[in-house]
Amino acid sequence: MKTKKITILFGALIILISSCKDYLDPWPNGNYDNENIWEYQNMVQGIINRCYDNIDAYSVGNSYRTYNDNEGAFLDGVTDDAVITSTANTLRRYAVNAMTSSNDPFATYWDRDYRTISQCNIFLKDGRGYNTRYMVKTTFNDQVRTRLQGEAYALRAFFEWDLLQKFGGKGTNGQMLGFPIITDVIDPYSDINYARDTFDDCVAQIIKDCDSALYYLPLAYRDFLYPGLSSSEMQYLGARYWNRFDDTGVWAIKATVYLTWASPRFNPTNDLARWDSAAKYAKKLVDFKLVTDNVASASASFRPTAKVDWFNPNSPEIVFSTRYITGQTYMERMFYPGGFQGNGELGATQEIVDAFGDNLGYPITHPSSNYDPLNPYANRDPRFYSVIFYNGAKANRLNDVAKPMYTFENWNVGVTAPGKDVAGARSDNSRTNYHIKKYIYMDVNWEDKSVKNAPHSKFIYRWAQFVLAFAEAANHVTGDPNVALYGMTPKAAIKYLRERNTYDNAVPGFKTTDPYLDEVVLAGEAAFDAFVKNERRIETCFEGMRFYDLRRWTTGDAPGEGNWEAVINQPVHGAYITETAPGTYTYDLGWEVETRAVPSPYNPIPYYEMLRMDKLVQNVGWPTWN
């Protein structure tokens, strides 16, 4: 049946187009249809509002998104940064090539993305959303309709990019493909059978939608950008629209798309114009924060050396984020071990631990490093201590380090018994003997009479990402990390991150001298590129980015081709620890925990879509998913 085909194709698209009641917000009852909603401005605005809901909400349930989902920290469990504790987890099954078409963790995102794109198409069709009368006063009406028009284009670009990042890849026909581009409202009773457009055409479509969005949107939602306006004149302007797309959010999409498109997997001829475009838009964001948002009178003024405050929903670090949740301890439950009433759902690998250098800024393998393999957690990069819990680490309250809430015991062999947090002792301990500290609010203690908590949101785009993007892209354009592009050198960009205060106690970074940065800059483009990749790994760990970074940085589409298997399909390790006396330990840091066996550098197109549309071409590496 055609209607059945459509229902499966785009996640109940037929329901959306024929009634809209499940996807327009508000939608009070069944007395409105696809036509008369245009007479009610709140319902028309609801088309766009629901698109934001699809950014904020989990694929299942009504909770708002933080980092504890398959697009966040768990996605690092398919990389060399983390190991997922539950062997039944779908992404863990993906990591070891045990995933089947019936438990594809990415299929829900295909459905979500197309549902949202279809809502944008309804709003944009024939200019109906733009020409709706929202306010009696013409000035206010123009502000609202212009903002909504820009947001519709930006949201469509955002979800198109999500489709391209998740499902773009080399098809079995030998072409680099993206997703089926849909920019019109689909007739639910027509025959639907789409082919995937080329990767390059999908990039062009996303950039086109971004440029359309920039035509309508304001620079940023900041009150201080509208000096002299009264509160009544600011009803539809300014900071009250935080968490919605403005120019800066659209620049973020463009910078991210160009960075991927410029990378080796998608840029085999190394077209420098792509790298230049990535650098250009990343630099616009870097400058916006350093100059425009760096205003002393602003309540959320940006300071480049300030720590990233994961618990501030209005953090100056944010370029674009989800709405925040309060009264919850999702992240703390996820990362703390069972001994401290957590679930220990994800453990850091030895590989990410080793990526952090020493307290002088050198890699731990460098001849000048302070690293001591007999005491591996001493004298480390200050950032390490705000990201990882290790054997002997203490969970201290924010303002009271004298009385630790918890001390981690991760030894496998003890004088009397294994440590309580050791891998394998219980199902809610990490499998690597490392637990994750990033995102944890350090005043949470479930033993308190009144348990404290803090707001959590997901910083989808934040300033540090674009410092890294600029450094990576500009280095490729100039060929020399000490040569400026758009007024900044790649070295100067990365220095901002190396100097920043750490997440937790705002411990200073490498503020005075940074000899390793100087050394690697002198070594040239290739050495600096490897350095930036490691800095990116450290800065964005457990944010769900390394999964796609490893793919864009590698080449090859089948076993034996390129370097993707050598990078991705490798063993990951933890620390096997022996307590030789109370408080004294030996460390085997080559303890293999799991071996990656990802079958393809690309995710599969959902199996049910392959069954329904014979024009679709599957990505290579998934022969049983056709």
Image: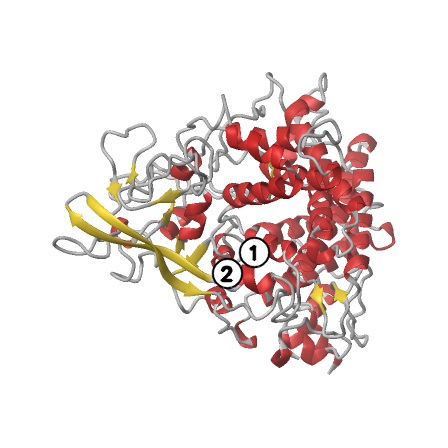
Residue 303 placement: quadrant: top right
Distance Cα–Cα, label 1 vs label 2: 7 Å
Q: Is residue 390 left or right of residue 173?
A: left
**Figure check: 21 above or below 156:** below
**Is 500 situated left or right of 196 in this image?**
left
Residue at the image position 73 percent from the left and 42 percent from the top:
278
Does 72 sit left or right of 11 as displayed? left
User: How many C-alpha atoms fall within 10 Å of the one at disc 1: few (<14), some, or many (≥20)?
Assistant: many
Can you see residue 552? Answer: yes
Identify the residue at image location x=81%, y=53%. Answer: 204
Q: Secondary structure at mark 2?
A: helix
> Measured from the top left, where is residue 539 in percent x and y?
52, 41
Q: Can you give x and y, in whole percent of width and height, for residue 268 in the image?
A: 75, 57
223 to the left or right of 441? right
Q: Where, quadrant-wise, is the C terminus in this rendering?
A: bottom right
Question: In the image, residue 139 lies at what x, y percent?
Answer: 81, 30
- Say what amino acid the circle numbered 2 marks: Val
Circle nearer the N terminus (1, 2): 2
Instruction: Write down the residue under mark 1.
Output: 547
Looking at this rendering, what residue extends furthest in the left direction?
Answer: 416
Label at residue 218: none
Callout 1, which amino acid? Phe
Q: Position of residue 29 (x, y in %)?
A: 64, 59
**Other residues around mark 2 within 10 Å, as few (<14) / some (14–19) / many (≥20):** many
Q: Identify the image's colour scheme: rainbow, by chain, secondary structure or one colour.
A: secondary structure
Figure quadrant of residue 397: top left
Q: Which residue is farthest right?
A: 126
Labels 1 & 2 near each other (Cβ < 8 A): yes
- Residue highlighted by disc 2: 78
Using the image as rendered, state which of residue 198 and residue 113 is in the foreground. 198
Q: At 72% across and 74% down in the image, what residue appears?
A: 172
